Amino acid sequence: MSNAVTVFISGITGVFAGMALLYFSLRITSFITDKLTASGADKK
Amino acid sequence: MFNSLQFLTTTTGFWHLTPGMMFMWLIGLGLIYLAISKQYEPLLLLPIGFGIILANLPLAGLMTPEEGLLWKFYEYGIHWEIIPPLIFLGLGALTDFGPLLSMPSLIFLGAAAQGGVYLTFFIANNFLGFDLMESATIGIIGGADGPTTIFLASKLAPHMLGICAVAAYSYMALVPIIQPPVMKALTTEKERKIRMKKGRKINKLEKLLFPIIATFVIILIVPASAPLISMFMVGNLFRESKVVERLTKASQEELLNIATIFLGLPVGATMNAENFLQWKVIFIFILGLCAFILSTAVGVCIAKVMNLFRKDKINPLLGAAGVSAVPMAARVVHKVGQEADKKNYLLMYAMGPNVAGVIGTVIAAGIFLTLLQP
């Protein structure tokens, strides 16, 4: 069983780490979709 | 004859009434009054209020284990993790992630607001004698997300489910009263006047990919959040795919409405006089308010910290939208922003951290479950 301090620190770290990973995933997705869109426009 | 009459009298509910039950009726009626007259979260507070009255009618047996109707709703709907995920399916189908995708850095404000959840957890455990699981359930109220509060309470502290749900929905209705003083106290007029730079343009493919990527990332990090996140994201995928209009509409309307009914009634019914009439309940309500205030404050402060590293400043009021009361918190940000500058339109920007807050609260709940579930 965890104590309050452990849960507190792990919790805040976990939420920020999770959101940070989601943020970087979004940035990578944006980069790729922007490239795809741009190459699609070039072909036209 | 007399004996028969006497026996008949003892079989009526009147004979078994207690002052505690009648007090609970008043609480139930009070919630019904607030829902109808003041329109405070009526979709939930109305059935919850009625559920409280039903659970406190003597001999009705609606919450009798294995037999009672509302007990069955509770057991198979909430305890079996059916209803809160169904609500999330509907919410996902209603959510537009566009504002978040056009400014992805606002996602951190949705994380920041969870600081209030963990601070309240810490206070409840260290200073008020709640155990770890009870403290987590109280802390999550600060996430301002009713279904997540109910989901977590049903797992960690079922005896506090009704109280925490009522506290969460009551404070969500009071967001326009609770948040503005905190936001104003932590920002200067100049900061409140900051105008946001227009976000980047997003394309359809990005919106379509978001629920899929988010599902992978979040569930891989916090597997315990899977029931809520998976349903939230599949609902959003229905919406963004544009090819399953019937499913989208059913998730947004019929299914969400039905799930809301089956959520509210049994949640209210968990609040019997024995559970509710304790000194701890007062602390739960105070801590719930404390969680809301802290979440708002941490969100605003982190927005100010982010500004230290950014060329294009963000309006720190957006941090308050990180609590996930969608879209109420975003509207409050917009209103407070307009009090400082009438031509400052913050609503669309505030929707970014607002929907990020929903994800943040689910992750926070998942972490609590991972660390604390027996």
Image (tube, rainbow, N blue to C red):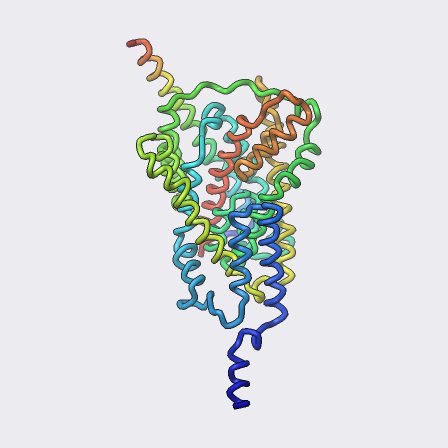
On the image, which quarter does residue B220 sit in?
top left
Q: Is residue B224 visible?
A: no
Residue B302's place in the image compared with B52, above or below, is above
Q: Position of residue B190 (x, y in %)?
A: 69, 22
> As displayed, is residue B362 above or below residue B66?
above
Q: Position of residue B334 (x, y in %)?
A: 60, 29
Residue B330 position, x and y percent, is 56, 33
Residue appearing at x 65%, y 26% in the figure: B338
Query: Is residue B138 at least partly visible in the picture?
Result: yes
Name the residue rendered at 44%, 40% in the picture: B91
| Residue at (42, 49) in percent of width and height | B259
Identity of the residue drawn at 49% across and 38% down: B358
Residue lying farthest to the left in this orientation: A43
B102 shown above or below B14: above
Q: Nearer the viewer, residue B317 or B171?
A: B171
Closest to the observer: B127 or B270? B270
Pinpoint residue B164: horizontal percent, then vertical percent.
55, 53
Placement of the C terminus of chain B among the 4 image quadrants: bottom left
Q: Quadrant of residue B213?
A: top left
* Front in this rendered view, residue B16 or B8: B8
